């Protein structure tokens, strides 16, 4: 595959993709079998942590800062062919609407369990469950409130690094969710039932592509990541299905230290059809700059 074709695919994905509701792990792909654990069965083989802190370059009244922490804890791993892990992620959204321009506004929470099976040398398969919820924090002055719960079972197909050119590799992940329990509680009657309404959420899909280029003989690399997905809603009156959407494009300078982890400086553009904060669904087009840390290969 030509490196320019790969770059074009990654850049076009956020533009052409239908887009999904906010997921705390939307920019993180957990790939526990990417590391080599050796032969045998391992119980409680270890844990990987993830952290991210960023500020808007272009924001709105609902976004100024974002802080995310999370990770995975292994339950059992068999050779390098199967892994069962617990996952978790928390994101706090801070808006500028107080006297210090730092007002914690909302928290998004995610926890779950996932089984990963190595299908081929290049492909892993995952089956998991995620419970997600969103709650307001400092909203006393506005008295505006929206509570969300959207739990799902999901399947995901992961590819390992695929060589594209010298020092260039491509990897991808396709995820499909089916929602089991949904709640969308809004504080104002004016906003009740206005789409997209999480209580009518049926399923969603997301495709993530990442292109890595290591031009130097150092641990430093450039990473370009694109994400796009679609959510399927139903309208009870006539049974019509609707699509809600979000997309993201992330460019990072990454330092990967085998056995130690990954650190990155990044800029990210993100569009959300519904930011999940205001009672009345509100879109957000955001640009971020920030730092993040994670586990080499097992989170990307």
Image: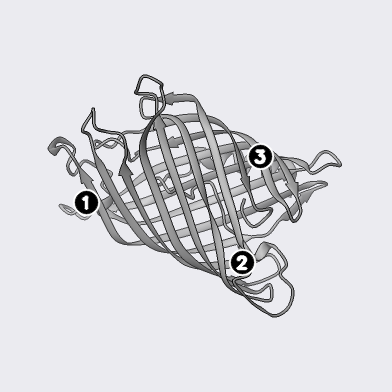
Q: Can residue 241 be seen in this snapshot? A: no
Q: Give whichever of discs 3 and 1 has the lower sequence position.
A: 1
Provide the residue designation for mark 3.
264
| Image spot of residue 126 (x, y percent) | 53, 67
Q: Nearer the viewer, residue 111 or 167?
A: 111
Question: In the rendered view, does 245 fall on the left or right side of 266?
Answer: left
Q: Secondary structure at mark 2?
A: strand
Compared with 242, 120 (above or below) is below
Compared with 58, 292 (above or below) is below
Q: Nearer the viewer, residue 288 or 157?
A: 288
Spot the residue most to the left.
189
Provide the residue designation for mark 2.
124
Q: Residues within 10 Å of mark 2 (few under 14, many from 20)?
A: many
Q: Residues within 10 Å of mark 3 (few under 14, many from 20)?
A: many
Q: Can residue 30 be seen in this snapshot? A: yes
Name which quarter of the figure residue 95 lies in: top left
Measure the C-alpha gap from mark 2 to mark 3: 25 Å
| Image spot of residue 15 (x, y percent) | 50, 37
Compared with 77, 46 (above or below) is above
| Image spot of residue 56 (x, y percent) | 49, 27
Provide the residue designation for mark 1.
235
Q: Give whichever of discs 2 and 3 has the lower sequence position.
A: 2
Compared with 104, 20 (above or below) is below
Could you tell me which residue is drawn at 68 percent across and 72 percent down? 80
Q: Secondary structure at mark 1?
A: loop
């Amino acid at each position: 595959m030509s490196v320019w074709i790969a770059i074009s695919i990654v850049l076009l994905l956020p533009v052409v993709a239908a887009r999904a509701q906010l997921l705390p792990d939307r920019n993180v792909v957990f790939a526990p079998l990417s590391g080599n654990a050796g032969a045998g069965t391992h119980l409680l083989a270890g844990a990987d942590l993830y952290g991210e802190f960023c500020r808007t370059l272009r924001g709105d009244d609902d976004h100024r800062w974002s802080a995310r922490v999370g990770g995975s804890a292994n339950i059992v791993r068999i050779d390098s062919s199967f892994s069962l892990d617990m996952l978790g992620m928390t994101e706090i959204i801070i808006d500028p609407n107080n006297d210090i321009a730092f007002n914690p506004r909302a928290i998004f929470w995610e926890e779950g369990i996932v089984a990963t099976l190595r299908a081929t040398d290049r492909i892993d398969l995952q089956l998991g469950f995620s419970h997600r919820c969103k709650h307001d924090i400092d909203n006393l002055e506005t008295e505006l409130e929206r509570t969300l719960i959207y739990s799902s079972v999901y399947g995901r197909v992961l590819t390992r690094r695929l060589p594209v050119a010298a020092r260039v590799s491509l990897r991808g992940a396709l995820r499909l969710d089916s929602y089991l329990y949904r709640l969308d509680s809004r504080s104002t009657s004016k906003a009740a039932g206005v789409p997209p309404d999480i209580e009518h959420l049926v399923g969603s899909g997301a495709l993530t592509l990442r292109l890595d280029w290591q031009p130097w003989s150092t641990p430093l690399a450039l990473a370009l990541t694109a994400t796009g997905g679609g959510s399927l809603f139903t309208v009870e009156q006539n049974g019509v299905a609707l699509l809600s959407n979000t997309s993201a494009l992330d460019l990072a300078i990454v330092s990967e230290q085998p056995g130690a982890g990954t650190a990155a400086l990044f800029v990210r553009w993100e569009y959300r059809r519904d930011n999940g904060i205001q009672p009345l669904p509100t879109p957000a087009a955001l640009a971020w700059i920030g730092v993040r840390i994670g586990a080499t290969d097992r989170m990307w």
